[in-house]
């Protein structure tokens, strides 16, 4: 990565590939949890309206599973970069796990929500939630039994888009880690960043669908690539 001395502001986008080595199923990878369920059956507002019990059971299982996993070397390396970087660093994640936070990162934007929150569709409150939702518990705020997973489903608008685009406008470097480049709007961030003059780097197990948009693409496991890149940045 040339021009290291001039880089101040970094936006990092992470996807399922950064958590895969922690044992969290990737969305689209072979053998992933989504093969047992069609996306339309568990990850759309229509599915929830049609069969709320199926959807709640699916997410109750994911919420329980995610709490048994641990952050890996890639999460820890990004947390270290956030702590030691002299400029601005924003971590934007498509992941609904909390492994970035458990590794010590603080400024993480979850554009697709998080398993460990419940959202009340009655009063719009969000609460940290580690248990199940299948038995329709009351909302701690309004008392209504209208809690759902605080996860962005297909057809819903991702969170924090204004903050993300503002960060991309100010970025000197955009780095995409472990994301397939298949899900928009996140898949378009690389084009937005490069049109605004940022350098762009992809770290991924294999070349993504949007690989050709990046100035540089490195392939390999996140637990190897990310710590190596962080060392480079902090040494520079």
Image: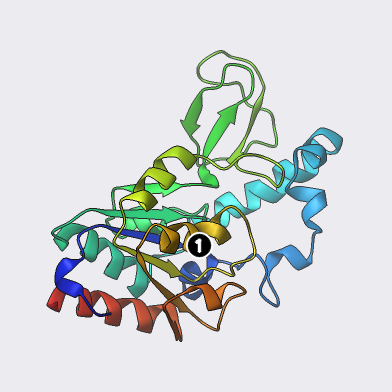
Question: Is 13 above or below relative to 167?
Answer: below
Q: Position of residue 81 (x, y in %)?
A: 22, 65
Q: In which image quadrant can residue 155 be found? A: top right
Q: Please provide percent x and percent y for residue 113.
A: 53, 44
Return the residue found at the far right: 50
Q: Residue furthest top?
A: 142
* 109 relative to 231 in the view: left or right: right
Q: Position of residue 231 (x, y in %)?
A: 21, 78
Given residues 53 and 214, the one toward you in this image is 214
Q: Quadrant of the C terminus?
A: bottom left
Q: Give the residue number, with chain letter if any, for mark 1.
A: 191
Q: Nearer the viewer, residue 137 or 210?
A: 210
> Where residue 39 sits in the image (x, y, percent)?
77, 55
- Neighbours of disc 1 within 10 Å: few (<14), some (14-19), many (20+): some
Q: How is the image coloured?
A: rainbow
Evaluate whether residue 37 shows in this view.
Answer: yes
Q: Can residue 68 be seen?
A: no
Q: Residue at x 66, y 74 (%)?
A: 29
Q: Left or right: where does residue 154 sit relative to residue 112?
A: right
* Element at label 1: helix
Front residue of 187/58: it is 187
Quadrant the N terminus occupies: bottom left
> Residue 173 sits in which quadrant?
bottom left
Q: Is 233 placed left or right of 141 in the picture?
A: left
Decide which of 17, 52 is in the foreground and name it: 17
Question: Total label count?
Answer: 1
Asked where in the image residue 62 lies, by quadrant, the reply is bottom right
- Residue at image x 40%, y 58%? 99
């Amino acid at each position: 990565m040339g021009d290291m001395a001039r880089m101040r502001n970094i936006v990092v986008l992470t996807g399922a590939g950064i958590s895969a080595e922690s044992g969290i199923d990737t969305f689209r990878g072979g053998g992933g949890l989504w093969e047992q369920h069609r996306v339309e059956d568990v990850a759309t507002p229509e599915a929830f309206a049609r069969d709320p019990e199926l959807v709640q059971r699916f997410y109750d299982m994911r919420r329980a599973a995610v709490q048994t996993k641990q952050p890996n070397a890639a999460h820890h390396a990004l947390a270290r970069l956030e702590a030691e970087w002299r400029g601005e660093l924003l971590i934007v994640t498509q992941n609904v796990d909390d492994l970035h936070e458990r590794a010590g990162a603080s400024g993480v934007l979850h554009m697709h929500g998080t398993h460990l929150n419940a959202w009340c569709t009655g009063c719009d409150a969000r609460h940290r939630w580690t248990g199940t939702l299948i038995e329709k518990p009351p909302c701690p705020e309004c008392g209504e039994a209208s809690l759902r997973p605080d996860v962005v489903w297909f057809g819903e608008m991702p969170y924090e888009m204004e903050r993300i685009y503002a960060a991309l406008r100010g970025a000197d470097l955009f780095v995409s880690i472990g994301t397939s480049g298949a899900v928009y709007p996140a898949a378009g961030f690389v084009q937005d960043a490069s049109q605004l003059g940022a350098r762009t780097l992809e770290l991924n197990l294999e070349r993504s669908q949007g690989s050709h948009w990046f100035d540089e693409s490195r392939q390999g496991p996140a637990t190897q690539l990310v710590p190596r890149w962080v060392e480079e940045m902090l040494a520079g």
